[in-house]
Amino acid sequence: MINLDADIVFLFVLSVFTLGAAILATVSVINVVRLRNVRLSWKTGKLGGYPLFSTLFMITVFAAGALAFYQGAMNAMILAGLYCWLGFCWFTTSYFAAKRFITDNGIVKNVNEPSQTVAWHQICDFVETESDTHAKYIFIYDTGKYSKVDDLLRLELQVPNHKKEYFQKLISHKLGRRIRCYVKDDINIQQFKQL
């Protein structure tokens, strides 16, 4: 049996994961660039729209890299560089996956997951509730595969207050001809499956 140095194995595994993260981040950026006719977008997340765990990971890696640079440890600086690139790719992927895009064609909840995109023609009804920081919209939609009312799906979307007026105009334009009015007390929104 071949006896390999543990450092080489760990470096190889880290390199493979770093390459995979770079590919995933590239795909995320390409998916965002490919979106056409984006009318509105906003960030979601705990840190003012920035991904929490990848941000904490990058802060930790920068601190470890600075310590390795201060000590002059070349191997540790190489590892810190790989971890830094991995963290940057993770941050990029998380940032774009958590961003909401409203296009002329529909609502894109996650650019990396096409099944979470809802076209305007799929929406059967919606409900709006308001809070201090955002307006919550619950869209009831049909994927086209189902015929029963019990199989309809729902998409919850939190729109920041500073984007709410434009978003209301947009949904009025896109849904106004098909959906004339809505009353939030008339619909039991818990009966629909959440996306």
Image (cartoon, rainbow, N blue to C red):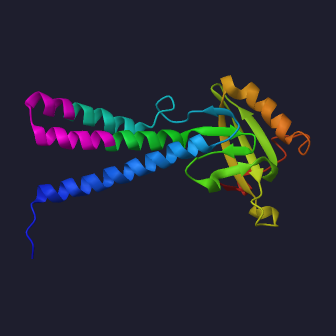
Q: Is residue 100 left or right of residue 25?
A: right
The answer to whether 137 is drawn above or below residue 47 in the figure is below
Which residues lie in the magenta part? 65-85
How far across and how far down the image is residue 133, in percent? 62, 26
Image mark count: 0
Quadrant in which residue 34 is drawn: top right
How far across and how far down the image is residue 82, in percent? 26, 44
How far across and how far down the image is residue 115, in percent? 64, 56
**Prevalent SS, magenta region:** helix
Find out whether residue 40 is within the magenta segment: no
Q: Nearer the viewer, residue 7 or 125?
A: 7
Q: Residue furthest bottom?
A: 1
How far across and how far down the image is residue 126, in percent? 79, 44
Q: Is residue 71 left or right of residue 94?
A: left
* Quadrant showing the N terminus: bottom left
Find out whether residue 72 is within the magenta segment: yes
Q: Is residue 120 left or right of residue 54?
A: right
Residue in view at x 12 percent, y 27 percent = 70
Q: Nearer the viewer, residue 67 or 11?
A: 11
Q: Is residue 138 left or right of residue 56?
A: right
Residue in view at x 65 percent, y 29 percent = 134
Residue in view at x 29 percent, y 39 percent = 84
